[in-house]
Amino acid sequence: MARIIVVTSGKGGVGKTTTSAALGAGLARAGYSTAVVDFDVGLRNLDLVMGCERRVVYDFINVINGDANLNQALVKDKRVEGLHVLPASQTRDKDALSEAGVADVLDALRERFDYIVCDSPAGIERGAALAMYHADDAVVVTNPEVSSVRDSDRVLGLLASKTKRAEEGREPVTEYLLLTRYSPARVDKGEMLSHEDVHEILSIPLLGVIPESEAVLNASNAGVPVVLESDTDAGQAYNDAVARYLGEERAHRFLDEKKGLLGRLFGS
Amino acid sequence: MSFLDYFRSQKKRSAAVAKERLQIIVAHERGQRGGPDYLPMMQDELLQVIRRYVDVGDDAVRLQVDRDGDYEVLELNVTLPEGSHSPVSAGEP
Ligand SMILES: Nc1ncnc2c1ncn2[C@@H]1O[C@H](COP(=O)(O)OP(=O)(O)O)[C@@H](O)[C@H]1O
Ligand SMILES: [Mg+2]
């Protein structure tokens, strides 16, 4: 039975698209056929982060409008077998993503894929609501910072009330916390909320902690999902998160400060 | 305490302050959630009515829906400014 995962946050710029690409690539690499769907109408970016921008011909809205079929619009990843991308439309008309159209496309994707990862736009308006509506699972991407944590809590409220599962009174959407852009050194100095703090406030299971890392920019520059860069800290942290999502138990890494020369000298 | 620890203890506070502020606002917002959609509008109108009699701030009126067994309780808290009467509180099923 296919599962739909929404990657959501409320706040923008916290790492949703980075996470969607990583999760999609990680699931596909684990052997599951996976489609990553860009819901950010007007601000298509998933294609760039996943490195398939030059092969985009049709998009999500073309499929909804019947200008293209799903096969024509899905872009097949060149690196990972079984990974596909459904690009967002660049139209400025946000209403082009109709509720019925989204439902039809997701139903069709469920027939073909094991996992469907929905990359939500920022905010809590229409686009974000559509991205979460059909979800079975939600990865709530949060930065250790006040506005991001508060927005995540609001999103949790919406997941519990405005999704199809909630409306139909079925088992609620399974929620996971993914803490990203984490700087152990700053946490250590008391300048940044710790993973325990955020976990305590939001009280949903912690899927992973992704460190603030140069590897993320490098990977997006190259158009490679960072999870495929196995020799980087962020790549490994995402890989652990994917394994946890698939039910494996893995200890959290990268929670401690990498000690620089000064730190070692002063023994802090 | 070394001089490094001194700076460290100063900074400890910013994350601690963030956590405390978040716990308060999140608890407050969760209290309003799950309530009927008209709640914010009602809160606003109540504020306007109260302002006809007393000069109060924007956050003087707090509404909260609590579940109590089979029914819901709408809790209304109005904070009056100092020098006027003490805050009134009313509950309605
Ligand atoms: N763990 C991280 N370390 C460093 N930079 C990151 C990390 N995660 C995301 N970023 C950067 O933050 C920016 C926003 O990320 P993005 O995934 O596009 O967020 P969103 O989709 O939530 O708007 C990008 O420039 C990305 O490279
Ligand atoms: Mg994005």
Image: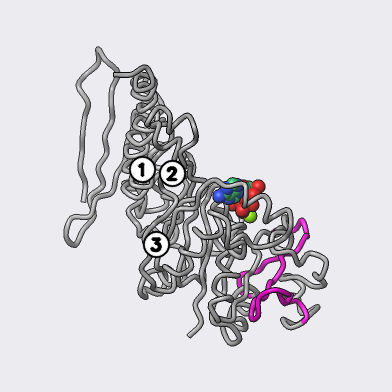
Q: CA distance from mark 3 to mark 2?
A: 16 Å
Mark 3 belongs to which amino acid?
Ala
Mark 1 belongs to which amino acid?
Val
Give the residue pinned by disc 1: B26
The disc label shown at residue A150, or none:
2
Which residue is at 28% across, 49% downward? B65
Front residue (pair B62, A28): A28
Q: Is mark 1 within 8 Å of ligand 1?
A: no
Front residue (pair B32, B12): B12
Q: CA distance from mark 1 to mark 3?
A: 15 Å
In the image, residue B63 above or below residue A134? above
Q: Are marks 2 and 1 on the same chain?
A: no
Q: CA distance from mark 2 to mark 1?
A: 7 Å
Callout 2–callout 1 Cβ contact below 8 Å: yes
Crowd class of label 3 (few under 14; some 14 to 19; many from 20; radius 10 Å) = some
Q: How is the model colour-coded?
A: one colour
Quarter-wise, where is residue B9 in the image? top left
**Magenta region includes residue A188:** no
Subunit ID for the residue under disc 2: A
In the image, residue A71 above or below residue A234? below
Secondary element at tag 3 = helix
Which residue is at 65% across, 80% downward? A81
Q: Is mark 2 within 8 Å of ligand 1?
A: no
Instruction: Assign the N terminus of chain B to one quadrant of the image.
Output: top left
In the image, residue A244 above or below residue B83? below
Res A13 visible = no
Give the residue pinned by disc 3: A160
Q: Is residue A22 left or right of residue A202?
A: right
- List x then y, in percent, for residue B90: 20, 38
Quarter-wise, where is residue B45 in the image? top left
Q: Is residue A5 left or right of residue B14?
A: right
